[in-house]
Amino acid sequence: MFRAFEVLLIVAVLAATAYTFQIKHESEERLAEIRKLEAEIKTYKDTIDLLEADWSLLNQPARVQKLIEAFQEQLQLTTTEADQIVRYDELPRIKPEPEIETDAIADQILTGAVE
């Protein structure tokens, strides 16, 4: 009986050890996945920072002015006059187009859908 108990304890210890190693392995895999995602997020943030820097360089007023002067013939841009700026309530109201009622039978006759 003493031998059976010792064998049972050894099996229990081995099972607990195997389970511990399994949990450790899974947690290391998850940690590696987290590190990979963090590196990917950092890459995306760096890319966004680079694109924002490029955008700010492309939108510099001096550069835009040079482009306007270089392509004035094609663009034909003019400065905005003060009387061109209006508030929303000063805009003319557009009347919606009236709905045209269609005759379903006439549509079938015209399209040849009558059986």
Image: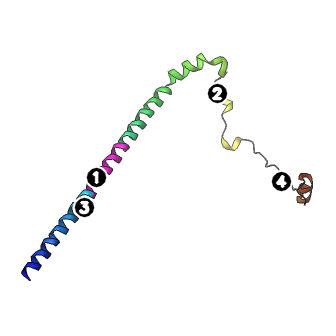
Disc 1 is placed on an element classified as helix
Circle 4 is placed at which residue position? 99
- Answer few, some or many: residues within 10 Å of disc 1's Cα (few below 14, many 20 plus, some between 14 and 19): few
Residue 28 highlighted magenta (yes or no):
yes
Disc 3 is placed on an element classified as helix
* Front position among marks 3 and 4: 3
* Front position among marks 3 and 1: 3
Circle 1 is placed at which residue position? 31
* Front position among marks 1 and 2: 1
- Quadrant, the C terminus: bottom right
Indicate which disc, 2 or 3, sits on the residue closer to the N terminus.
Answer: 3
Circle 2 is placed at which residue position? 80
Contact between marks 3 and 4 (CB within 8 A): the answer is: no
Indicate which disc, 1 or 2, sits on the residue closer to the N terminus.
Answer: 1
Return the x and y of residue 87 as percentages of the image width and height: 66, 40
The residue closer to the viewer here, 83 or 9, is 9
Return the x and y of residue 83 as percentages of the image width and height: 68, 31
The residue closer to the viewer here, 64 or 14, is 14
* Front position among marks 1 and 4: 1
- In the picture, residue 28 is in which quadrant? bottom left
Three-letter code for the amino acid on which mark 3 is drawn: Gln
Circle 3 is placed at which residue position? 22
Q: Residue at x 32, y 50 (%)?
A: 34
Magenta stretch in the rendered image: 26-41
